[in-house]
Image: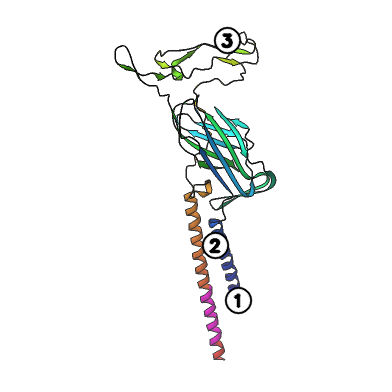
Amino acid sequence: MIHTMQSKQSNLLVIVLTISILSIIIITGPAKAFVLNLTSDKSSVTIGDSLVFNASISIVDESLPIEKIILELEGPENISCEFQPDSTILTGCKGISIKKITGDSSEYGYNYGYNEGYSYDFGYGYGYLGDLTYEITLSTADYLTGEYKTKLVVPMDNKNFTKDGPTLNINAVVVSTTPNRHNSTTRTVICTSANWQCTDWSQCINGYETRICTNSNDNCLLYLIPNQTRTCLIENNNTNSNNLGNLNENITNSTTENLFQTNRLSGITGAVIGSLGSTPGKIIIFLIITILILLSIVFGAISFLRYKRFKTTNTLKLETQ
């Protein structure tokens, strides 16, 4: 009876110790299997200029099921440019062109990744290996001026892995002041979209529609003139052909829907972050491991005391006999 109880206690102690060791291994885990990075060649540009982002995904050891990559800009307007790993643009990439620099390796295999020491089992399937590097060129001609925060996002298995990029400033055109005939100075400003008034699009003639845009502010710089010609697919006798299927985007300063999920906790090393890598998650895991270690100590102490008591009892019985 006593031996049976001791055997059960020993087995329970082994299980608790095993769970504790595995939990510690998961927390301290191996090196991350993928790292995101986002840089740019300029941090400040004048509206109408272009800049180049360099986005990279370094994948080590295991293949990852990357379905798409997202470049996000958050500022006066929100942009969420989605493209496939082969650089094919999906949606939301206003004024953006993407060129794949490196990364042709893809294969079927077991997809498994780590993020800040935590493992993610992505299952068996199509995945990417090696480094994926992209040159993303952004033309600011149709963007609102102001400060933008940039971010690279890689969604996988209902999780968003992100890397904050550099802050981007799009500045208005600087126009030098000149004296007028009254010896005072005047300053020309940029025409905004609110200054422009455009007629309805004309009928589709020879594959083109036209309109006329005028500006209500005579003192502004005629810089961002709306598109006054666009291609069309079919002819329409209606003078207002805004509902035609168009090949070109209607150039207006509209706000693109912000598709990204809020996840602003930065990683310890500045690499990618995931939902399980958050501070509350780490605290909970730390508390669980601490409790398991304390339970291991308690069970060990109880087992040792019972063993000593059993040994003492047997010794007394032998001496009595």
Rendered-image quadrant of the N terminus: bottom right
* Residue 18 vertical placement versus 285 (above, below): below
Span highlighted in magenta in the image: 303-316
Residue 82 image offset from top left, x and y in percent: 58, 34
- Residue depicted at x 54% and y 78%: 307
Closer to the camera, 158 or 127? 127
Q: Is residue 310 magenta?
A: yes
Q: Residues within 10 Å of mark 1 (few under 14, many from 20)?
A: few
* Residue 74 vertical placement versus 60 (above, below): above
What's the amino acid at mark 3?
Ser
Q: Are marks 3 and 2 in contact (CB under 8 Å)?
A: no
Cα–Cα gap, marks 3 and 1? 96 Å
* Residue 209 vertical placement versus 304 (above, below): above
SS assignment for the magenta stretch, majority = helix
Residue 44 image offset from top left, x and y in percent: 45, 32
Which residue is under mark 3?
202
Which residue is under mark 1?
3
What's the amino acid at mark 2?
Ser
Q: Are marks 3 and 1 in contact (CB under 8 Å)?
A: no
Q: In which quarter of the view is residue 167 placed?
A: top left
* Residue 99 vertical placement versus 315 (above, below): above
Q: Secondary structure at mark 3?
A: loop
Cα–Cα gap, marks 3 and 2? 73 Å
Q: Secondary structure at mark 2?
A: helix
* Label located before the other in sequence (3 or 1): 1
Residue 20's tag is 2
* Label located before the other in sequence (2 or 1): 1
Q: Residues within 10 Å of mark 2 (few under 14, many from 20)?
A: many
Q: Is residue 94 visible?
A: no
Residue 134 image offset from top left, x and y in percent: 59, 37
* Label located before the other in sequence (3 or 2): 2
